[in-house]
Amino acid sequence: MKSARWVLAALLVSSLATAVPAAMTINLGVVTKPGSAQNIAAEKFKELIEQRSDGKIQVKIHHSASLGNETEILQQIQMGSVQMGVITDGPFDTFDPLVRVINYPFLFKDNAQADTILDGPIGKEILTSLESVGFKGLAFSENGFRDLSNNKRAVKTPADVVGLKIRVMQSPLHQAIWLALGANPTPMPWPIYTELEQGVIDGQENPLWVFEVYKMYEVQKYASVTRHVYSAHIDVASLGWWKKLDAKSQDMIRKAMYEAAVYQRKINRDGDAKRLALLSQKGMRVEYNPDLAAFRAKVADIKNLDLYKDPRVQALLLKTLNAVK
Ligand code: EAX
C-alpha cells in the first residue's frame, strides 16, 4: 500500500515537472550592437520568455560580433555550442539555398506583403527546410528593405552603379544581383565601418536603421532609396538542442520568439521616415526616386541563374513570384 502511494506521488511530481519548463540559460547570438534591429528582437524575446517562465528560462544575448560574424554564429548554432540566433537572411544562403527566395530582388512590394508571405505557408516551408542543415527555424523578424549608399556619385539609374565597389553580404545571390547591375560586388561579413572609412569599398547596401545606428552618414556621401531586396532575419535555434527540450519549453520559446519578431518589425517600420529625414540632415545627398523600373529590368534574368536551378528552389521561387503578383 505504502509503495502504491509512493508511485502515485512520484507520478504527480513528474507530471508537474512537465508543466513548467526546465531551468536553462539560452545563449543567443547577434552580430550587431545594442539598438540594432537584431538586438531589438533578441531583447524582446528575452523579456517575454524570462517573464513567462518565471525566470526559469534565462537568455544571455551575445551581441556586437562577440561570437564572430553571422556565418560563424550560424556554425556555432549548428554545433549546439550556441542555442539561438537572430541572423540576417543573407548568410543563410550558403547553408540552405531555399533562403534565396526571400532575397529575390524587388520581390515584395511592401511590408504587408512580406509579412503575408513569410508568416504564411511559404515562410513555413523555408523555416522547415532549415532543419535539414541543423537549424530549428522559429520566426522572421526583419532587417528591412535595403537601400544603397556610396562615396563616388549620386545613383539614379543602373548606369550610375557601373564599376562601383559595393560590399555585399556573404551570399552568392547578393553578389549576382550587383554583378547584374554592373557593380563590382565584394562579399564581406558585417561590420564594415573601417572598410568604408578607409575607402577599401565605395559603397554598401542596408536598411535605413543601419544608416542611423552605424552612422553611415559619416563615411558615405550618397544614398539612394532603391529598396532592391527585402531582408529578413531568421530567428533560429540549434536543432539538436531543440529536440531535447520538453514540449512546454518549445512552445513557450516559439511563441515568445514570434511575438518578439512581430513587435520588432513594427518598431523598425515606424522609425523609417525619421531615419530617412536624418540622412539629409546629416549631410548625405539622398536620391529619393531612383529609376526602379530600370533597376528591375537589369535583374530580371536572375531567376534563370544556376543559383535558382535546384528544382526545389525554383519551384518555391515561382510559387512566391506568383503569390506576390
Ligand atoms: O544587419 O551584413 C549586413 O549587411 C547586415 O544587413 C548587417 O549585419 C546589418
Image: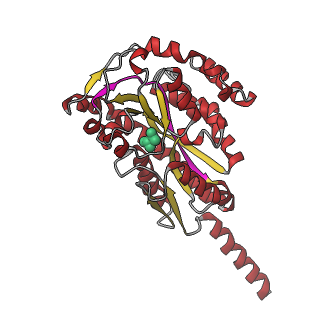
In the visual, does 311 lie left or right of 265?
Answer: right
Q: Position of residue 82 (x, y in %)?
A: 56, 60
Identify the image quadrant of residue 8: bottom right
Residue at the (69%, 25%) spot, across then down: 314
Q: Position of residue 45 (x, y in %)?
A: 46, 52
Quarter of the N terminus within the rendering = bottom right
Looking at the image, residue 103 sits to the left or right of residue 306; the answer is: left
| Magenta stretch: includes residue 181 | no
What secondary structure is the stretch in magenta mostly built from? strand
Residue at 34% over, 38% down: 199
Tell me how many marks there are: 0
Residue 317 appears left or right of 43? right
Region in magenta? 221-237
Name which quarter of the figure residue 292 lies in.
top left
**Place of residue 204 in the rendered image (x, y in percent of width and height, measured from the top left):** 40, 34
Q: Where is residue 228 in the image (x, y as percent from the top left)?
A: 46, 24
Residue drawn at x 45%, y 57% as measured from the top left = 46
Name the foreground residue: 147 vs 84: 147
Which of the pair 107/21 is nearer the observer?
107
In the rendered view of the protein, which quadrant contains the C terminus? top right
Its colouring scheme is secondary structure
Residue occupying the far bottom of the picture? 2
Examine the rendered structure and indicate whether residue 83 appears above or below residue 149.
below
Ligand 1's image quarter is top left
Question: Does residue 146 appear in the picture of this structure?
Answer: no
The reply to whether residue 243 is visible in this rendering is: yes
* 83 or 248: nearer the viewer: 83
